[in-house]
Amino acid sequence: MKTKFTPLVLLQKQKIDVIEQEIERNAQAIKGKQEEIDTLIAEFATLKEPTSGVYQAFLTFVHHKNEYYQSIDYKMGELALLKKKKQELQEAFRLQNIELEKAKYLDSLEVKKVLQRLKKRENVEMDEISVMLYANNKEIL
């Protein structure tokens, strides 16, 4: 049964769906970022310090090592931002669910009111029919 609150319920559901999609995209981004970090750490672990050779090779090793540190640190910062956004989205989802429950409650109250009015109207009509039948039966007798 449609009430004046039905569009509000539908709107709240749509908002929840959008937030759920954002949460899913964010989870995928977190997973991807974590995989990037794991890959960088694995690559960093394969770096070998030169044991002999020119000083330039050692400087190149140090430079590559610092690049990996910076890349890992940067990716960790991005991961932290994604995790913060995840918390914000979960809070928005929680609040939106509360709003949806409010709208559903108002909708159910409105449905109950309409059903009560219909029942009351039916009772009144049944009473009128009973009175008319009683009056007709009295005339016949």
Image (cartoon, grey):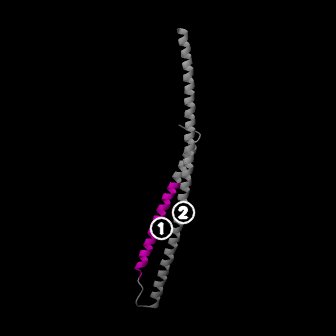
Furthest toward the top, the residue is 141
Q: Is residue 48 above or below residue 99?
A: below
Q: Is residue 15 above or below residue 111?
A: below
Considering depth in this image, is 60 or 69 the residue closer to the camera? 69
Give the magenta-colored segment's residue range. 19-47
Amino acid type for the residue under numbered disc 1 = Lys
Q: Is residue 36 above or below residue 135?
A: below
Residue pointed to by mark 1: 33
Considering depth in this image, is 98 or 17 the residue closer to the camera? 98
**Image spot of residue 61 (x, y percent):** 45, 84
Helix, strand or loop status at disc 1: helix
Query: Residue 52 falls in which quadrant of the image?
Result: bottom left
**Image spot of residue 47 (x, y percent):** 42, 81
Q: CA distance from mark 2 to mark 1?
A: 14 Å
**Image spot of residue 78 (x, y percent):** 52, 69
**Image spot of residue 36 (x, y percent):** 45, 70
Amino acid type for the residue under numbered disc 2 = Lys
| Residue in the picture at 53% in, 48% down | 13
**Quick one: label 1, few (<14), some, or many (20+) residues within 10 Å?**
some
Query: Residue 84 falls in which quadrant of the image?
Result: bottom right
Marks 2 and 1 close (CB-CB < 8 Å): no
Residue pointed to by mark 2: 85
| Residue in the picture at 43% in, 71% down | 38
User: Does the magenta-highlighted stretch encompass residue 136?
Assistant: no
| Residue in the picture at 57% in, 25% down | 124
